[in-house]
Image: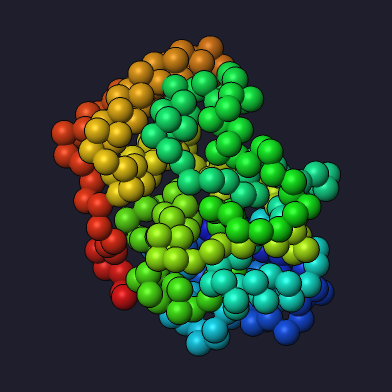
Amino acid sequence: MVTYNSEDVIEACIAALRQHAPEVRVVVVDNASADGTVARAKATGAEVIANRENRGFAGAVNQGFRAVDTEILLVMNPDVRIQTGLGPLEAAARKHGVAGGVLTNEAGAVQAGFTIRRFPTPTVLSLEFLGINRLWPGNPWNRHYRYQNWDLSRGGTVDQPAGAFLMIRRDVWANLGGMDEQFYPIWFEDVDFCKRATDAGCQIQFVPEAKAEHVGGHSIHRMEECHRQVQWYDSLLRYTAKHFRPASYGVVTLAGALGAFPRMVVGLIQERSLRPIGCFFNILSLLGNRLVSRPPSGQSKRPGSEY
């Protein structure tokens, strides 16, 4: 469990684990929280690895895998509260290597479009950058990407369950070299992991019998808005560079540049300040740099990390 300023949710998360899966060993990897997350996690009896710096989600997940020697590990966000036992999820992960369950909101509605997704294509990411998926969420590319035609009461092989509630067999993680820590601090590291797992022959499973409530975004909403946007663009482009051909990478990058302007206009209207203008130019600078100097496509670690 990776935490970052998660004191408001960590205790309820671990309490739910203790209730529904009392045999589970809980390991919390904290990314230099500035609040009481570490103290509250320790008070529950969980094992806590307290980082002095934020190593990102992927780096912290890799730390968690190295800290224990069990065959199966559940990667779970601290704002997730499991509502069932983990038996069906564990059985699927043991057999197939990777498995995810159903995520619901606090009202109990399934988080359709988030719980499972297909791997993004250049078209889908371009539409995402241009804001078309928001303006026309029912477009055929977006519906396909978000499994809108999938009956979420039915299990089976899928592309990518949400990384917020993902069970992984150790040998799959080891054979892939762990999660790619260049996706820093967050976003697309779970998509990249599932893509590489699938490319290696893994049939990732969706297990509707395993359910959990998911609050969502408890940490990222504390990030400064412009910084959050730039990091999202950066991670998306890193995924694109890693898995798409150069021509497709260029198209997605240009779509990002075109879509940044209307995002700035909306920001100006909503915030009634000039801050979105500065953010717009930061994003354009990033996109220009990425278009000229494409990120490396190989699996890599961040400086200072330990594989």
Residue located at (47% from left, 32% from top)? 124
14 displayed left or right of 254: right
Residue located at (17% from left, 39% from top)? 293
50 displayed left or right of 105: left
Q: Based on the displayed image, in which of its 4 quarters is residue 14 positioned?
A: bottom right
- Residue 277, compared with residue 80, is above or below; it is above
Out of 278 and 131, give the one closest to the viewer. 131
Colour mode of the rendering: rainbow
Report whether residue 118 is seen. Answer: yes
Q: Based on the displayed image, in which of its 4 quarters is residue 28 positioned?
A: bottom right
Report whether residue 278 is seen. Answer: no
Residue located at (54% from left, 72% from top)? 97
Out of 118 and 33, give the one closest to the viewer. 118
- Residue 14, compared with residue 283, is above or below; it is below
Q: Position of residue 96 (x, y in %)?
A: 57, 71
Query: Where the N terminus falls, by quadrant?
Result: bottom right
Q: Position of residue 298 (x, y in %)?
A: 25, 58
Query: Where the C terminus falls, by quadrant?
Result: bottom left
152 displayed left or right of 299: right
Q: Position of residue 172 (x, y in %)?
A: 45, 73
- Residue 249, compared with residue 188, is above or below; it is above
What is the residue that sits farthest to the bottom in this orientation? 69
Residue located at (22% from left, 51% from top)? 296
Q: Position of residue 265 (x, y in %)?
A: 46, 13
